[in-house]
Amino acid sequence: MTIEEFYATFDPSGNEYANVMGRLATERLVNKYLNKMLDDKSYGNLKQAVADGDYKSAFMASHTIKGICMNLNLKPLADSSDALTEELRNDPDAGKVEELLKQVEKDYEFVADGIRNIG
Amino acid sequence: MSEGLRKKKILVVDDSEMNRSILADMLGDDYEILEATNGVEAIAAIKERESEITLMLLDIVMPQMDGFEVLSIMNKGGWIGNIPVIMISAETSSNLVNQAYDMGVTDYISRPFDGKIVRRRVNNTIMLYTKQKMLQGMIAEQILEKEKSSSLMVDILSNIVEFRNGESGLHVLHVRTITETLLKHLAEKTDQYDLNHTKIAMISLASALHDIGKISIDEKILNKPGRLTDEEFVIMKTHSAIGGDMLMNVAHRRDEELVKVAYEICRWHHERYNGRGYPDGLKGEEIPISAQVVAMADVYDALTSKRVYKPAFSHEKAVEMIMNGECGVFNPLLLECLQDVKEYLKEELENKTLKSVAEDEVQSMTEELIAKGDTIASDRTLRLLEQERIKYQFFASMSKEIQFEYNVDTDMVTLSEWGAKYLGVDELVMHPFEDEKMAEILNVEKMHEIRRKVRATNYTNPVVGGVYRLHVNGEDRWHRMTVRAMWEGTEEKMHYTGAIGKFANVDEDYKRMDSLEKEASHDTLTGLFNHMNARKLIEAVLAERRDHTYSLILFDLDHFKDANDQYGHLFGDNVLKHVAQKLTDNLRREDIVARVGGDEFMIFLEHGGNFEAQVKRIFQVVDGEYENFQISVSMGVSLAPKDGEDYETLFHAADQALYVSKRGGRNQYRFYDNSMKGTLSVLSPMDGEE
């Protein structure tokens, strides 16, 4: 799968791909950061923090994921982590956090699978 | 950019490694990227390399210390004015963005980053600030120069101020204003005298000193109502040469430009252009321009002021008299200047108050800056600062001292590199009084004690000291602390801004002192002699070789270890003191009583033959109770000269007798006899344990 095909898996319009290439200029850099994202510990930290009920750390981790996804135009994960971040920011509701985290997990696994298939 | 070494540095502060990496990729071609992963590291980097950092990219949401806290510290520390900050964040709430702008950020870049936009904003911001910094550098340079001059002035003036006569305050001010006005105009008229702004400022400043020689003139002559006699006038005239001499004697500053200029003015402000002045009769351009101008200013102000022997002439009359040569001949060019500026001068002098002088300086400096606009000054200033930093770091690393700086506004301690390493903490510690690591090194009580001491100082006496035990690398070490409080403002209105200081390791000195104390004559706990001193005394007695007989008694307390174990060392100490007291009470002044080890005592006394009764009495004296602790002793005795004639032998014999009495079930005394030869000893080194 090419990088362009990867982006098409969640955005058939090609807008996200065009945007990320516009900003980061080369496929080499986009590829570098996509792979870096897999190494980033925020996702693991997020799950652990939620499990521990440590919403402050969860907020940090979720916020980082959101920032990364915005930079890489990973739209679905950017959206779901944004929703989770906002829930965690003030007075989070445990039930809602669980629910939003499920969506983040789903989107993350989807994106991660996709990235591993780029080559 | 090919000059890799000279790339400008950008500090990227973001907790996400990925974001830092993206920004580094976007900017790395043109800039050198420094990275910080949170606010604390960012502040450390700023403190360390303020002058090198051209721009800071700052994330808002970060662990430990977030972007707003960083901004707040940068505001308090005054760094926000020197380092432009661009906020970067995924936050889009206008509230937060506005808050960031309010706290001094220059620009705001939201995620996702666009390479072109990031580069453009960074470039624009840096250009804007470079210009601003350049101007600041120039101003700083000028202010430095001014401060140096002014403080020198104060040095000189403070020495003579008590001699000044009451009227001269305004005179000095007027002469200065006239001098400055004339010089500025002269500089417009001709290049002949090479008068730039700095030189004009310096001559004007130095003009204040033109009459300092008058402090040596008899007050009767100085303040005489009426004209001076010829003799008096001769004396009066010496003031210019004397003033010059005074400046020459400012020995260590003789080479300073200001001193040179002031010398010219003092010595030659009564010279005249035709050579008819004093003290040297210089002629024409032999007279430095500084002295020429001050001479005219001096004359003008004398004419327009009321003196005991004359009324004040009007401005017009004074100018007329000078133009007509009634007060001596002046440089024609200067006379022209006086004509040109006379109206301005009249107005200027009427409005002149002390306060406006300072404002004038700022005004003229600003004008000069606008006209000049080159960057030499700013580069030099920065270079000098950088040099100072390197010097400081070098000396700090050599000194093997913990040097520190505390800022009360940011509540932050900065440690020297060496100091931080030595203590095993970061160079930058936020909220040190609440910091756990700090509390491990120096207990909180002591920290607060130091804080109280420092805050109790004042402007004139800001240094405090003390010796403190720091816990370093798992052991306690004594350190001598010296701290200087930083007070800002004037004596009337002081403001505490923090403190600087150092801790120097004096542990060895203390340990040496401790051992010296041991070598000193008395045991500190019991007040008895110590072993070393007792030995010396005994040896001295034995050396006299009189035909007397002596007993050397050694004893230790039975089961003393139990007292310590059961009731603690303090109790044990009290038992020892109790025993010591009993011995002192029951022995003669000339007997030698010593504590020679933990619970071991030694007594050396002359016995008149009946040694057994004597020993028995002592044995019974110490026997008893101390707060329910049963005291009994095991004792060993040797006799001189029977068992030996020197200390070593006697001690060893008593020691062996002691061993035997312990082996015999304690709570007894034994005299040495030959059967004990070769037994183990209690106190001698050959014995491994009790």
Image (cartoon, rainbow, N blue to C red):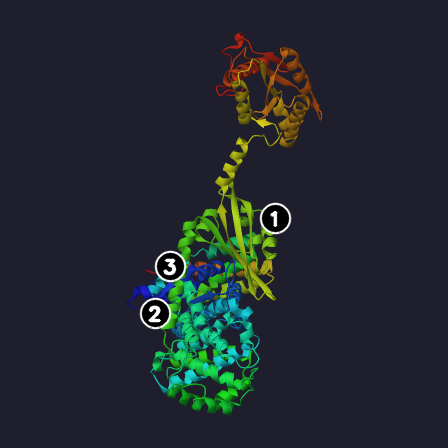
**In the rendered image, which residue does mark 1 sit on?**
B445
Which amino acid lies under the numbered mark 3 shown in the image of this protein? Asn
Which amino acid lies under the numbered mark 2 shown in the image of this protein? Ala
Q: Do marks 3 and 2 both belong to one polypeptide chain?
A: yes
Is tag 3's residue or tag 2's residue first in the polypeptide sequence?
Answer: 2
Q: Secondary structure at mark 2?
A: loop
Q: Secondary structure at mark 3?
A: helix
Q: Secondary structure at mark 1?
A: helix
**In the rendered image, which residue does mark 3 sit on?**
A35
Q: CA distance from mark 1 to mark 3?
A: 52 Å
Q: CA distance from mark 1 to mark 2?
A: 58 Å
In the rendered view, tell whether residue B678 sits above or below residue B247.
Answer: above
Q: Write down the chain letter for disc 2.
A: A
**In the rendered image, which residue does mark 2 sit on?**
A25
Q: Quadrant of the C terminus of chain B?
A: top right
Label at residue B618:
none
Mark 1 against mark 3, which lies toward the viewer? 1
